[in-house]
Image: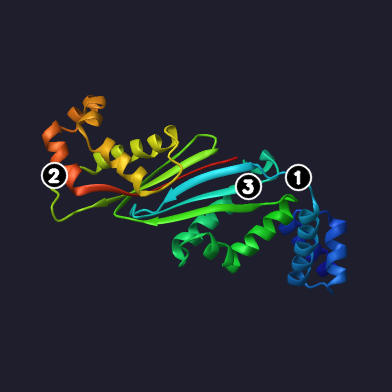
Amino acid sequence: MKKKNSLILKLRKFTKFSILLCKKALKKNKWDIKKSIEYLRKKINSKLKNNNYKINNGIVISKINRNKNIGVIIKINVNSDFIINNIYFKNFIKKIIKISFKSNINNIKDLLKNSIVKNEILDKNLMFKETIIISNFYKIKCDYINFYNHHNYKFSSIVGLKINYKNIYNLNYKFINYISKKISIYIITNNFIINNKKNLIKLNKYFFSKDFFINNKKIFYKFNYNHKKFLYIFENNIKIKYFKYYLVS
């Protein structure tokens, strides 16, 4: 009896379902925890598929690795914003992002095919009794990556810079960090949702130009860059190669 009670409590702790439902699931599956979890996953997901809730809520978040050369932006939709600040939901996002960094995952198809990711989504559907969908995912690999997350995680952007290390000198990474952060914010404020050649040309033309220097004089002087030095170092050796911007809608 003690063993059965401990199994019920274990299943309850994992699924956050009632003791009665956990007991029923275990009884039906001959007190096998793994089979009971699978049973409950199917049960809750069949219910969620049939519900009529809108899934316009959720978050968008960007992250980069320690070397700042791999970055991801991910959009997750849910039925309501109720679960967004939940610690289990936050840990779920962290886990998905870690998997995307370590594994050979380059797009949303790869991500959703991953067995660990699949089970994580099913388990969180089970836990929160809500439909959780990874609706967008983008991964970039570049020489230097930066991002911007809005404080409520309703919109986010990521940008990748191509740097010619052979020709560049007096490279100030604090300044590159400043420039790339500015680009990330600019992408959102100017609604650069589409990543195409025209938009990349526009972005490169503005950020590595005299106009940008004039608009940010104080910062340039702080980093000891005059206009000619800035253009020589950055215009010829640093380019915006990738960007992506998602918003919750």
Q: Is mark 3 on a helix, strand or loop?
A: strand
Q: Determine whether, in the image, residue 143 is placed left or right of residue 157.
A: left
Q: What element carries label 1?
A: loop
**Among all residues in the image, which is located at the extreme front?**
198
Task: Classify 10 Å Cα crowding around label 2: few (below 14), some (14-19), many (20 and above).
Answer: few
Report the quarter where the C terminus lies. Answer: top right
Cα distance in 3D space between marks 2 and 1: 55 Å
> Which of the labelled discs sits on residue 213, or is there none?
none
Indicate the position of residue 179 as horizontal and vertical percent values. Answer: 29, 38
Residue 137 screen position, x and y as percent: 51, 54
- Name the residue: 69% across, 41% down: 80
Q: Measuring from the top left, give residue 143's x and y in whole percent.
A: 29, 54
Instruction: Using the image, tell me which numbered label, if any, was put on residue 77.
Output: 3
In the image, residue 47 sits, relative to residue 180, either above or below, namely below
Instruction: For the residues labelled 2 and 1, say whether their Cβ atoms are less than 8 Å apart.
Output: no
Amino acid under disc 2: Asn
Pointers 3 and 2 in contact (CB under 8 A)? no
Q: Which amino acid does label 3 sit on?
A: Asn
Quadrant location of the N terminus?
bottom right
Residue situated in front as seen by the camera: 233 or 151? 233
Inter-mark Cα distance, 3 to 2? 44 Å
Q: Which of marks 2 and 1 is in front?
A: 1
* Mark 1 neighbour density, 10 Å: few (under 14) some (14–19) many (20 or more): few
**Label 2 or label 1, whichever comes before in sequence order:** 1
Give the camera-side residue of 231 and 12: 231
Point out the frontmost of discs 3 and 2: 3
Task: Read off the residue under disc 2.
Answer: 170
Q: In this view, does 124 lie to the left or right of 66?
A: right
- Whether residue 6 is visible, yes or no, is no
Q: What residue type is labelled 1?
A: Tyr
Residue 53 has which mark? Answer: 1
